Image: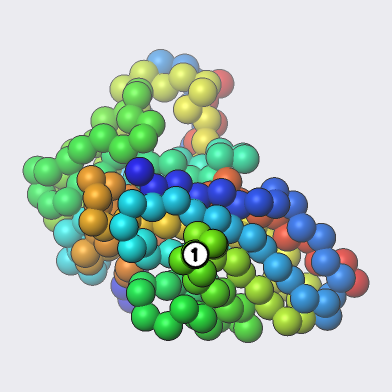
Amino acid sequence: EAQVTQNPRYLITVTGKKLTVTCSQNMNHEYMSWYRQDPGLGLRQIYYSMNVEVTDKGDVPEGYKVSRKEKRNFPLILESPSPNQTSLYFCASSTTGTGEGYTFGSGTRLTVV
Amino acid sequence: AQSVTQLDSHVSVSEGTPVLLRCNYSSSYSPSLFWYVQHPNKGLQLLLKYTSAATLVKGINGFEAEFKKSETSFHLTKPSAHMSDAAEYFCVVSDWATDSWGKLQFGAGTQVVVTP
Protein backbone atom coordinates (compact mmCIF):
# COMPACT_ATOMS: atom_id res chain seq x y z
CA GLU A 1 0.00 0.00 0.00
CA ALA A 2 1.27 3.44 -0.96
CA GLN A 3 1.80 5.44 2.19
CA VAL A 4 3.80 7.90 4.24
CA THR A 5 4.75 6.49 7.63
CA GLN A 6 5.59 8.69 10.58
CA ASN A 7 6.90 7.59 13.94
CA PRO A 8 6.13 8.01 16.71
CA ARG A 9 2.41 8.91 16.67
CA TYR A 10 2.60 10.48 20.12
CA LEU A 11 5.58 11.83 22.01
CA ILE A 12 5.95 13.65 25.31
CA THR A 13 9.41 14.98 26.05
CA VAL A 14 11.19 17.52 28.22
CA THR A 15 12.69 20.82 27.19
CA GLY A 16 16.14 20.48 25.68
CA LYS A 17 16.15 16.75 25.07
CA LYS A 18 16.98 16.07 21.42
CA LEU A 19 14.46 14.07 19.46
CA THR A 20 13.87 12.80 15.94
CA VAL A 21 10.57 12.18 14.20
CA THR A 22 10.98 9.76 11.34
CA CYS A 23 9.19 9.88 8.00
CA SER A 24 9.33 7.28 5.29
CA GLN A 25 7.50 6.94 1.97
CA ASN A 26 7.26 3.94 -0.34
CA MET A 27 6.14 5.69 -3.51
CA ASN A 28 9.52 6.79 -4.86
CA HIS A 29 8.45 10.43 -4.52
CA GLU A 30 11.11 13.06 -5.04
CA TYR A 31 9.40 15.82 -3.07
CA MET A 32 8.95 15.58 0.70
CA SER A 33 7.89 18.15 3.25
CA TRP A 34 7.19 18.71 6.94
CA TYR A 35 4.29 20.77 8.28
CA ARG A 36 3.15 21.70 11.76
CA GLN A 37 -0.50 22.23 12.64
CA ASP A 38 -1.58 24.65 15.35
CA PRO A 39 -5.15 25.71 16.23
CA GLY A 40 -6.33 28.68 14.22
CA LEU A 41 -3.23 28.67 12.02
CA GLY A 42 -3.81 25.74 9.72
CA LEU A 43 -0.71 23.87 8.59
CA ARG A 44 2.56 25.69 8.07
CA GLN A 45 5.55 24.35 6.19
CA ILE A 46 8.72 23.76 8.21
CA TYR A 47 11.16 22.33 5.66
CA TYR A 48 10.97 20.67 2.30
CA SER A 49 13.19 18.59 0.06
CA MET A 50 13.07 18.35 -3.72
CA ASN A 51 15.43 15.39 -3.89
CA VAL A 52 18.23 13.57 -2.10
CA GLU A 53 20.63 16.02 -0.46
CA VAL A 54 18.44 18.98 -1.49
CA THR A 55 16.56 20.64 1.36
CA ASP A 56 15.29 24.15 2.00
CA LYS A 57 13.47 26.16 4.64
CA GLY A 58 9.74 26.63 4.67
CA ASP A 59 7.83 29.28 6.61
CA VAL A 60 8.70 28.22 10.17
CA PRO A 61 12.11 26.49 10.16
CA GLU A 62 13.51 27.89 13.44
CA GLY A 63 14.40 25.17 15.92
CA TYR A 64 14.23 22.34 13.39
CA LYS A 65 16.65 20.43 11.21
CA VAL A 66 16.10 17.91 8.45
CA SER A 67 18.18 15.61 6.32
CA ARG A 68 17.58 13.72 3.08
CA LYS A 69 20.25 11.09 2.69
CA GLU A 70 17.93 8.59 1.01
CA LYS A 71 14.99 9.23 -1.25
CA ARG A 72 12.48 7.45 0.96
CA ASN A 73 13.39 9.01 4.33
CA PHE A 74 13.04 12.58 5.57
CA PRO A 75 13.52 12.80 9.36
CA LEU A 76 12.68 15.92 11.37
CA ILE A 77 15.16 16.71 14.13
CA LEU A 78 14.58 18.94 17.14
CA GLU A 79 18.02 19.54 18.64
CA SER A 80 16.74 21.35 21.73
CA PRO A 81 12.95 21.21 21.90
CA SER A 82 11.05 24.00 23.60
CA PRO A 83 7.40 24.19 24.73
CA ASN A 84 6.48 26.37 21.73
CA GLN A 85 7.24 23.37 19.53
CA THR A 86 4.33 21.50 21.06
CA SER A 87 2.24 20.80 18.00
CA LEU A 88 0.86 18.24 15.57
CA TYR A 89 3.37 17.42 12.84
CA PHE A 90 2.69 16.02 9.39
CA CYS A 91 5.09 14.64 6.85
CA ALA A 92 4.03 14.63 3.20
CA SER A 93 5.39 13.47 -0.11
CA SER A 94 4.54 14.19 -3.71
CA THR A 95 5.59 13.16 -7.20
CA THR A 96 5.90 16.60 -8.64
CA GLY A 97 5.76 19.10 -5.82
CA THR A 98 3.07 21.07 -7.64
CA GLY A 99 0.44 20.28 -5.07
CA GLU A 100 -1.14 17.41 -6.92
CA GLY A 101 -0.69 13.92 -5.64
CA TYR A 102 0.28 14.89 -2.12
CA THR A 103 0.19 12.03 0.39
CA PHE A 104 0.22 12.88 4.08
CA GLY A 105 1.37 10.79 7.00
CA SER A 106 -0.94 10.16 9.96
CA GLY A 107 0.68 12.83 12.10
CA THR A 108 2.86 13.00 15.20
CA ARG A 109 1.51 14.76 18.26
CA LEU A 110 4.45 16.22 20.16
CA THR A 111 4.25 17.70 23.65
CA VAL A 112 7.28 19.46 25.12
CA VAL A 113 7.08 20.12 28.86
CA ALA B 1 3.06 35.28 -2.82
CA GLN B 2 0.17 32.96 -2.30
CA SER B 3 -2.28 33.10 0.59
CA VAL B 4 -5.62 31.65 1.61
CA THR B 5 -8.40 33.12 3.72
CA GLN B 6 -11.17 30.95 5.06
CA LEU B 7 -13.93 33.34 5.94
CA ASP B 8 -15.53 31.28 8.72
CA SER B 9 -13.67 29.64 11.56
CA HIS B 10 -16.80 27.73 12.66
CA VAL B 11 -19.91 26.65 10.78
CA SER B 12 -22.86 24.94 12.39
CA VAL B 13 -25.51 23.23 10.24
CA SER B 14 -28.43 20.93 10.81
CA GLU B 15 -28.34 17.45 9.34
CA GLY B 16 -29.91 17.44 5.89
CA THR B 17 -29.34 21.16 5.23
CA PRO B 18 -26.79 22.65 2.79
CA VAL B 19 -23.22 23.32 3.77
CA LEU B 20 -21.21 26.29 2.48
CA LEU B 21 -17.57 26.84 3.40
CA ARG B 22 -16.03 29.99 2.00
CA CYS B 23 -12.49 30.40 0.77
CA ASN B 24 -10.69 33.28 -0.94
CA TYR B 25 -7.17 32.99 -2.28
CA SER B 26 -4.37 35.17 -3.50
CA SER B 27 -1.92 33.88 -6.07
CA SER B 28 0.46 35.37 -8.60
CA TYR B 29 -0.33 32.93 -11.38
CA SER B 30 -2.86 30.25 -12.10
CA PRO B 31 -3.04 28.29 -8.89
CA SER B 32 -3.97 24.78 -8.04
CA LEU B 33 -6.62 24.75 -5.31
CA PHE B 34 -7.63 22.00 -2.96
CA TRP B 35 -9.98 21.22 -0.12
CA TYR B 36 -8.80 18.82 2.57
CA VAL B 37 -10.82 17.40 5.45
CA GLN B 38 -9.52 16.33 8.85
CA HIS B 39 -11.73 14.25 11.11
CA PRO B 40 -10.98 14.27 14.84
CA ASN B 41 -7.66 12.60 15.62
CA LYS B 42 -7.19 11.66 12.00
CA GLY B 43 -4.88 12.70 9.19
CA LEU B 44 -5.68 14.82 6.17
CA GLN B 45 -7.87 13.55 3.37
CA LEU B 46 -8.15 15.19 -0.04
CA LEU B 47 -11.77 16.12 -0.83
CA LEU B 48 -11.26 17.66 -4.26
CA LYS B 49 -8.84 19.65 -6.37
CA TYR B 50 -8.90 22.30 -9.09
CA THR B 51 -6.02 22.32 -11.56
CA SER B 52 -7.16 24.62 -14.41
CA ALA B 53 -9.64 22.24 -16.00
CA ALA B 54 -13.38 22.52 -15.30
CA THR B 55 -14.26 25.33 -12.91
CA LEU B 56 -16.87 23.24 -11.10
CA VAL B 57 -15.09 20.44 -9.34
CA LYS B 58 -16.76 17.42 -7.85
CA GLY B 59 -15.15 15.59 -4.98
CA ILE B 60 -15.80 12.73 -2.65
CA ASN B 61 -18.77 12.36 -0.28
CA GLY B 62 -21.01 14.67 -2.31
CA PHE B 63 -18.86 17.79 -1.97
CA GLU B 64 -18.15 20.17 -4.80
CA ALA B 65 -16.39 23.49 -5.25
CA GLU B 66 -16.48 26.22 -7.85
CA PHE B 67 -13.41 28.13 -8.95
CA LYS B 68 -14.24 31.78 -9.67
CA LYS B 69 -11.20 33.61 -10.93
CA SER B 70 -12.90 37.02 -11.02
CA GLU B 71 -13.77 36.69 -7.33
CA THR B 72 -10.61 34.75 -6.38
CA SER B 73 -12.85 32.31 -4.56
CA PHE B 74 -13.08 28.56 -4.21
CA HIS B 75 -16.10 27.88 -2.00
CA LEU B 76 -16.97 24.36 -0.92
CA THR B 77 -20.57 23.18 -0.88
CA LYS B 78 -22.65 20.12 -0.15
CA PRO B 79 -26.42 20.00 -0.72
CA SER B 80 -27.26 17.96 2.36
CA ALA B 81 -25.08 17.64 5.45
CA HIS B 82 -24.55 14.30 7.14
CA MET B 83 -23.45 13.73 10.71
CA SER B 84 -20.22 12.22 9.40
CA ASP B 85 -19.34 15.59 7.80
CA ALA B 86 -18.45 17.00 11.21
CA ALA B 87 -14.75 17.76 10.85
CA GLU B 88 -12.26 20.51 10.13
CA TYR B 89 -11.90 21.64 6.53
CA PHE B 90 -8.90 23.31 4.98
CA CYS B 91 -8.73 25.31 1.78
CA VAL B 92 -5.28 25.03 0.22
CA VAL B 93 -3.49 26.77 -2.65
CA SER B 94 -0.39 25.71 -4.51
CA ASP B 95 1.29 28.02 -6.98
CA TRP B 96 3.88 26.02 -8.88
CA ALA B 97 4.97 28.89 -11.10
CA THR B 98 6.49 30.97 -8.31
CA ASP B 99 9.27 30.42 -5.84
CA SER B 100 6.67 28.75 -3.66
CA TRP B 101 7.06 25.71 -5.86
CA GLY B 102 5.70 22.66 -4.15
CA LYS B 103 4.46 24.40 -1.05
CA LEU B 104 0.88 23.97 0.01
CA GLN B 105 -0.44 27.16 1.60
CA PHE B 106 -3.18 26.25 4.06
CA GLY B 107 -6.04 28.36 5.28
CA ALA B 108 -6.67 28.51 9.03
CA GLY B 109 -9.43 25.93 8.79
CA THR B 110 -13.21 25.85 9.26
CA GLN B 111 -14.65 23.67 11.98
CA VAL B 112 -17.97 22.16 10.89
CA VAL B 113 -20.51 21.05 13.48
CA VAL B 114 -23.55 19.07 12.35
CA THR B 115 -26.55 18.95 14.68
CA PRO B 116 -29.31 16.33 14.48
Where is residue A2? Give x, y as percent: 31, 72
Label 1: chain? B
Between B25 and B107, the one nearer to me in the picture: B25
**Left or right position of B92 against A101:** right
The quarter of the image holding the C terminus of chain B is bottom right
* Front residue of this view, candidates A22 and B55: B55
Q: Position of residue A73 (x, y in %)?
A: 22, 51
Q: Label 1 is placed on what type of residue?
A: Ser
Which residue is rendered at x = 81% and y = 60% of the image?
B12
Q: Name which residue lies at 61% across and 78% down.
A: B63
Q: Position of residue A22 (x, y in %)?
A: 31, 45
Seen in the image, is B21 located left or right of residue A67? Answer: right
Q: Secondary structure at mark 1?
A: loop
> Most extreme residue toward the front, as rendered?
B70
Q: Residue at x 23, y 56 (%)?
A: B97
Colour convention: rainbow
Neighbor class of circle 1 (other Cα within 10 Å; few <14, some 14-19, many 20+) is few
Q: Residue furthest right?
A: B116
Residue A62 visible here: yes
Instruction: State the residue position of label 1.
Output: B70
Q: Is residue B89 above or below residue A36?
A: below
Q: Nearer the viewer, residue A75 or A34?
A: A34
Quarter the N terminus of chain B occupies: top left
In depth, the one of B68 and B64 nearer the eye is B68
Q: Where does the image place residue B80, in percent across and percent down from the top left?
A: 76, 81
In the rendered view, does A2 fall on the left or right side of B67?
Answer: left
Residue B45 can be seen, yes or no: no
Q: Residue at image x 31%, y 38%? A: A58
The answer to whether B53 is drawn above or below residue A27 in the figure is below
Q: Is residue A86 above or below residue A107?
A: above
Quadrant in the rendering for residue B76:
bottom right
